[in-house]
Image (spheres, rainbow, N blue to C red):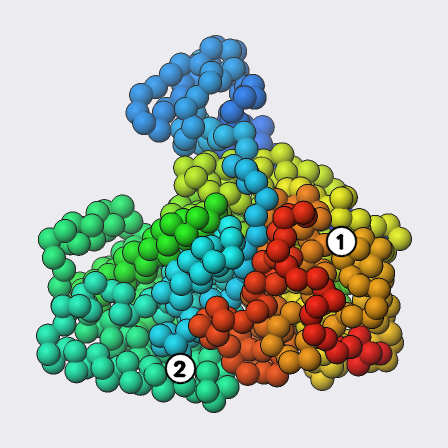
Amino acid sequence: MTPLSDDLRELARLHGVDTSYTAWDGTPLTVGSSAVVGVLAALDVDASSPELVRLALAQARSAAAERLLPPCVVARAGRDTSVPVPPGARLWIGLEAGGRLEVAGGVLPELPLGYHSLELTTADGRSARAALISAPARVRTPAEKSWGYTVQLYSALSRRSWGMGDLGDLAELAQWSGRGLGAGFVLVNPLHTMLPAASAGHSPYWPSSRRYSDPVHVRIEDVPEFGYLDAAGRRAAEGFAERAGELRARVLDGNALIDRDAVWEVKRQALELLFKVGRGPGRQAVYEEFLRREGLRLDDFATYRALAGRHGADWREWPAELRDPRGAAVARARGELAEEVEFHRWLAWTVDQQLQSAQRAAKDAGMAVGVVHDLAVGVHPGGADTWALQELFAPGMTVGAPPDAFTAQGQDWQQPPWRPDRLAQAGYEPFADLLRGVLRHAGALRMDHVLGLFRLWWVPRGRPLSEGAYVRYDHEAMLAVLALEAHRAGAMVIGEDLGTVEDGVRELLADHGVLGTSVLWFEQDEAGRPLPARQWREGCLATVTTHDLPSTAARLDGLHLELLDQHGMLNGPLEEERAAAVAEIRTWQEELRRTGLLADDGASAQDAAPSGPSADTLALHRYLARTPARLMGVWLPDAVGDVRSQNLPGTFDEHPNWQHVIADGAGRPVTLEDLAEAPGPVLLADALTPTGTSTARPLTDVAHNNCFERLQ
């Protein structure tokens, strides 16, 4: 690896590129010069030779010296904020609501929350503008402790859904768990618009657009125009429903994988039928209000969708003249495809309406939070967002993670990163707009890899994942936008802060009111033993497992080790890994017995009938209830002893990621109707009831056999 010159190191620093970092195990590492040069190139900085490095460094220093204002200034409520003002200069604030204020001495007055601007004029006539974000001091946090289900929505089918879980199922799940079990929220996977699975796989964390939700989640019968179909339309709708019933039967009765593309094909035809029905004047007025609010961003999204229907999902493979969303060819195409563009606008509104209904159902059911939506960390490089906002993304880069204890080879998320300089130049409006869209009908937002607000691991495409560099973002500006948008939406924020975390980052997030994520298996003390419940964070969502980890039943059975071994993903020989897993579970059982949450008679594992949570599973969730964590999440498949993994990180086609329906321990599909009749949800709800008020049966009453012995 070629050593970094002092000039290259300084040039990288001025552009927010780290030239060293600390690995997951504490080892200090230096970034290679080729990675630094590649990352700088994506920021339009040519550092390919020592001469060009010196030239670029001189330009960067000169630009910094001449800058009159920073790109963005953040004013947090309750804190003093000042801006350096040259002698004789005048400084004004342009308010979001209109009007201007002159600032004396550079000390900003108390401001209304919002997106303002700073305007500075020097005595010699130079001028500058900067974004000014006035944000609340903190995001709202839970007033009381509550629990809720976490679920991949597509996997939660009812006997009414069309081959995969939909927004009607989400409303049903919220009403049932809220009214019947006392749940305070339901956390779902990202519902973002996807590319066809044939083009981009099945992962909801690799979307085409994070701004709009996918119409595949629409419940067809809940679209109001469904009730106004004429006789011919009803016959057509019955045909679509019959085909959808076949897809549903394949999954629920034939135990087939969920086929998102097939579901969308049937739903698309049904929605085209409903689109032609027309709307009454009241709904038309609501629709037109939606169009006005969404404006150009919706026009771009709908145009992309219409063009994708003609030229394929990946815009990078379109004719060259159509790759520019502001070009004349696209303007002509928008006119030629006007009806299709309008259809996709209407689809976006239809999804929005049902998202609103789902949140309303959750709140009506007494949920303190309601629906928690998930925001993916990035998007597909050939999707709608990268087409419409090309200038914001770094070309030739992919985002991921360097090698760590979780993935020895590193992670490639195959997502282009946002350029921090372009975000700042845009006053962070693209980020604010994204958040507004996702938060509109959310009680809370889960941010996947919230650490990306601080830095992201950029890797030049085609290079090994270890040959990347961390690129810095203005986290104060990003957190200010997040706090302001969450405040305006009346929502909370949960940050997925797992993995390699820099010192001080969790503290900064907590200072802004952003809740963390604590997973039971990762909560250990310095000796590697279970962290005592009372020492857990209060400001977090605490869970036993997540969608990227084995289900609780699979971990207790050791089935996850067999799966990893099948794919060659174990860090050591199977027997060594099995022994380590046995030791881990034994340690947890000791902790559960020590705290009185697990009986001493050996009762410890799966139900004799594989249809519910084991005594161990219940005890682990009771342990969550002993922690001060304000939110507690239950992986919905754990309620029926599901052993299948929704996602096996590090695989693509090798494992059927994101395609499993919820099933019991024997692999039999379980519908929402079945869940409502099963004992597991009640037992888990009781396990999470605050100590002293639970109505759950004693753990020794739970039928069991010893899967711990099978693991050994």
85 w.r.t. 668: above or below: above
Residue at 56% in and 19% down:
80
The residue beneath circle 1 is 523
Residue 646 visible here? yes
Residue at 80% in and 49% down:
532
477 sits left or right of 365 in the view: right
Inspect the image, locate mark 2, and give the three-letter code of the amino acid beneath it: Arg
Q: Residues within 10 Å of mark 2 (few under 14, many from 20)?
A: many
Looking at the image, the residue that sits furthest to the bottom is 254
Looking at the image, the residue that sits furthest to the right is 527
Q: Position of residue 52 (x, y in %)?
A: 63, 48
Residue at 79% in and 58% down:
592
Question: Count the marks: how many?
Answer: 2
**Which mark is on residue 248?**
2
CA distance separating discs 1 and 2: 39 Å
- Name the N-terminal-most of marks 1 and 2: 2
Residue in front for this viewpoint, 55 or 194: 194
Classify residue 243 by image quadrant: bottom left
Inspect the image, locate mark 1, and give the three-letter code of the amino acid beneath it: Glu
For numbered disc 1, what is the local secondary structure? loop
80 sits left or right of 576 in the view: left
Q: Are marks 1 and 2 in contact (CB under 8 Å)?
A: no
